[in-house]
Image (cartoon, helix red, strand yellow):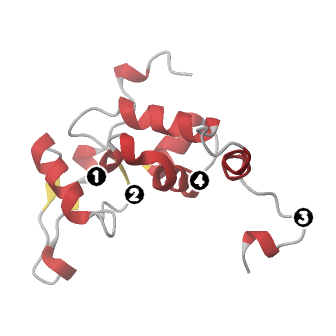
Amino acid sequence: MSEESLPGAARPAYDTAYEEYPDALPEYAERVLEVAELIPSGRVMTYGDVAEWLEEGGPRQVGRAMALFGGAVPWWRVVRADGVLLPGHELRALEHYRAEGTPLKEASRAAEGHLPRLDMKRARWDGGERAQGHT
């Protein structure tokens, strides 16, 4: 059952705002993209990390905002918590990770496609000093 078919289901604010003003960037998406731009080269944050930092939404809302509006920011730095590369964008992301020196775990021979994963223990950024004063 889709969200639209649920009786009285509230749609996310960024969906309704985008429909009313298609050229406007929804406020929540703008905040998500601002966080993505703060993540240092060679580091990553999970979708859940971004939501927690914003104190709003959750991983799915951040993922939706990144999918719809994230092409102009370093999208490869907002990732899945398990370190798996973004399906459909693995090779482009991998190019960025290697160029930036993002820590990776090499794939085992049994791994599908033999693609590495992000080494989340070493690559994850918690906001650090640059997050001070962020609202």
Q: Residue at x 51, y 53 (%)?
A: 68
Residue 76's x, y, as percent? Answer: 30, 50
117 in relation to 78, above or below: below
Which badge, 3 or 2, comes first in the chain's sequence? 3
Asked if residue 81 is positioned above or below residue 29 in the image, the reply reads: below
Closer to us: 110 or 71: 71
The residue positioned farthest toward the right in the image shown: 8
Quarter in which the N terminus is drawn: bottom right
Report the Cα–Cα distance between label 3 and label 2.
32 Å
Q: Which residue is mark 3?
A: 8
Q: Amino acid at mark 2?
A: Ala
- Look at the numbered discs 2 and 1 and tell me whether their residues touch, using CB distance below 8 Å: yes
Quadrant of res 100:
top left
Label 3 amino acid?
Gly
Classify residue 102 by image quadrant: top left
Q: How many marks?
A: 4
- Dot 2 or dot 4, earlier in sequence: 4
Cα distance, mark 3 to mark 1? 39 Å
To which residue does mark 1 refer? 120
Q: Residue at x 21, y 58 (%)?
A: 92
- Residue with the mark numbered 4: 61
Which mark sits nearer the N-terminus, 3 or 1? 3
Residue linked to disc 2: 81
Residue depth check, mark 3 versus mark 1: number of the one nearer the observer: 3
